[in-house]
Amino acid sequence: MGASYENDRLQNNAGGIFEALYRTDSRRPLQSLPVDNLVPTDLALRLVQDRADIDISGPEFNFVRSIRVFDVRYARQHESGRDGDCNRSATVVLGTYGTQGDFSWQRSSTTALPEAHVGLERWGEHCPGIYHRSVFVDWRDYDGNYGFEQVNY
């Protein structure tokens, strides 16, 4: 969500990449690299940022494609006017992962939110006042067990 404990952020993630490539007890890389003991920062970043070199299209990676991210950016319901008209408006988007782990957003709605989501239970009832914002992530693990996390903001 953009929070960090780091005071001075590096311009790139080269430090983390090098940590992942090298063991702490050895100078030998965990991954073969084109240059002996010297890895240009740009090359290391390109290796990681372009794409992973594995195929995750098989059914054993269905847990990746099961991850859904609902961003309830705005949901408001309230009465207005003399007639007591009920005004409802909501902006909900759904993020999903594709066959090879590519992530994309699409428009969604409050009715698409899973039952586990809390905060809009009375949406559409008569017209109770509701103002809600949240990020809701759900998934199925490798064994098919359901899990979720919600952050209201």
Image: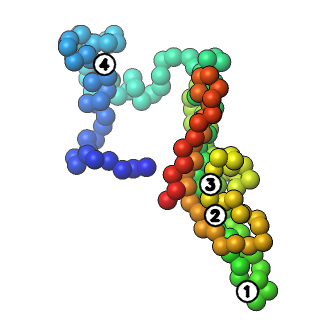
Left or right: residue 33 compared with residue 82 = left
Q: What residue appears at the point 30 percent right and 37 percent down from the top-left corner?
A: 12
Q: Compared to 5, does 43 lie above or below?
A: above
Label 3 CA crowd tier, 10 Å (few <14, some 14–19, many 20+) = few
Label 1 CA crowd tier, 10 Å (few <14, some 14–19, many 20+) = few
Do the CB atoms of the residues marked 1 and 2 lie less than 8 Å apart?
Answer: no
Task: Residue under label 1, please give it.
Answer: 81
Task: Residue under label 3, please give it.
Answer: 118
Q: Earlier in the sequence, mark 1 or mark 2?
A: 2
The one nearer the camera, 68 or 104, is 68
The one nearer the camera, 85 or 115, is 115
Q: Secondary structure at mark 4?
A: helix
Do the CB atoms of the residues marked 2 and 4 lie less than 8 Å apart?
Answer: no
Q: Which mark is residue 120?
A: none
* Whole-number angstrom distance, CA of label 4 to CA of label 1: 63 Å
Q: Secondary structure at mark 1?
A: loop
* Whole-number angstrom distance, CA of label 2 to CA of label 4: 44 Å
Q: Residue furthest bottom?
A: 82
Left or right: residue 110 compared with residue 152 = right
Label 2 CA crowd tier, 10 Å (few <14, some 14–19, many 20+) = many
Q: Earlier in the sequence, mark 3 or mark 1?
A: 1
The mark lying in front, picked from 2 and 4, is: 2
Q: Identify residue type, mark 4.
A: Leu
Query: How many numbered marks have been drawn onto this rendered protein structure?
Result: 4
The one nearer the camera, 58 or 136, is 136
Q: Secondary structure at mark 3?
A: loop
The one nearer the camera, 126 or 24, is 126
Q: Identify residue type, mark 2.
A: Ala
Task: Residue under label 4, please give it.
Answer: 21
The mark lying in front, picked from 4 and 3, is: 3
Q: What residue appears at the point 35 percent right and 28 percent down from the top-left corner?
A: 45
The mark lying in front, picked from 3 and 2, is: 3
